[in-house]
Amino acid sequence: MVSSLATTPAFLRLAAHPLRWRLLSELAMSDYRVRELVELAGEPQNLVSYHLRLLRDGGLVTSRRSTFDARDTYYHLDLERCAHALATTGAALHPALRLTSPTPPPQAIPLSTSPHPASSHLASPEPAPGQPVWSQPVSSQPAPGQLASPQVAPGQLASPHPAPGRPALPQAPARRARVLFACTGNSARSPIAEALLRHRAGGHVETASAGSHPRDRLHPGAVTVLREHFGLDVRDRRPRHLDTVSGHRFDYVISLCDKVREVFPDFPGRPLRLHWSIPDPASADAAGLVRTAEEIDSRIHYLLPVLTSQEAPP
């Protein structure tokens, strides 16, 4: 007779432990360093490190060296892998409980060597004096060979019929959540996140981006990736300094760079601060920039239900 332990799904064996579940819950929203997880969990560091290792060995958690301090490591929960694990766990108990397996984010097509006509501007020019940084029009056109996104009717959330297993967007909250993305140069990671969230949310989330040391212009590769793989044109977008948005109220402030996380200014209203530890793609080749955009897009897929499922603070 096969032991019950041998037949228990691996996800249940990993997640059922109270401390591991606490670590998974914390990492579901933000990347953290070990010392931060120790403080959040209220457990000794050696115990937290032991359970993090088990989660890494099980493939649910990944780690990256901090680009701010190489002695630190950031831990990240792979929500896509968790979704697949949950989709198959129910079937281990009874076939009728099998969840629909989620589909992964669409794979980016190889970068073309031939120029494509630019799509209509997604728009992200500098706002006029006194205009909120997020009040920018949302428009996009599909790149050649790319299927057009369905039009969103007024008052309707984008993607009313998400891919099987993907988190469905609930009804829009009374007030749209306001999100700020930040990285050092505001030239690649944070503009990509801003453009993708604005596009995916269909106008139901207000978003902006900025940097601690903004570059003169957006990374050309980031502009190309957004145009050719997502049908978004950000050519008119210019990097901006964090100081230009420090007086605005945000509900979520998300750093995509380990360095900028350390120099965040204080924002009014005490927004929730999250961190996505994503390597700087400035020196990456075309394939590296595509991977960066894919990772950001995957994270945004799982951020959207959080932003739209509850009313933003007044």
Image (tube, rainbow, N blue to C red):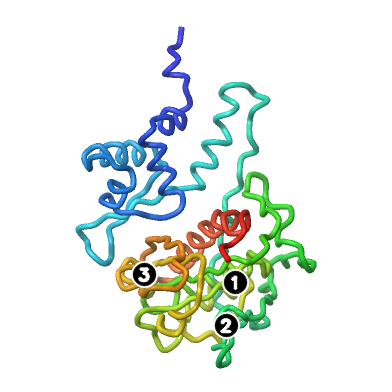
| Residue 201 vertical placement versus 34 (above, below) | below
Residue 147 place in picture, x, y as percent = 71, 65
Mark 2 or 1, nearer chain start: 2
| Residue 1 vertical placement versus 132 (above, below) | above
Q: Which picture quadrant has residue 200?
A: bottom right
Nearest the eye: 54 or 309: 309
Mark 3 or 1, nearer chain start: 1
Circle number at residue 280: 3
Nearest the eye: 234 or 48: 48
Q: Amino acid at mark 2?
A: Pro
Proximity of marks 3 and 1: CB atoms separated by less than 8 Å:
no
Residue carrying label 2: 132
Nearest the eye: 219 or 9: 9
In the rendered image, the quadrant that contains the C terminus is bottom right
Residue 288 place in picture, x, y as percent = 42, 66
Q: Amino acid at mark 3?
A: Asp
- Secondary structure state at the residue bearing disc 2: loop
Q: Amino acid at mark 1?
A: Glu
Residue 192 place in picture, x, y as percent = 51, 72
Q: Residue at x 51, y 61 (%)?
A: 294
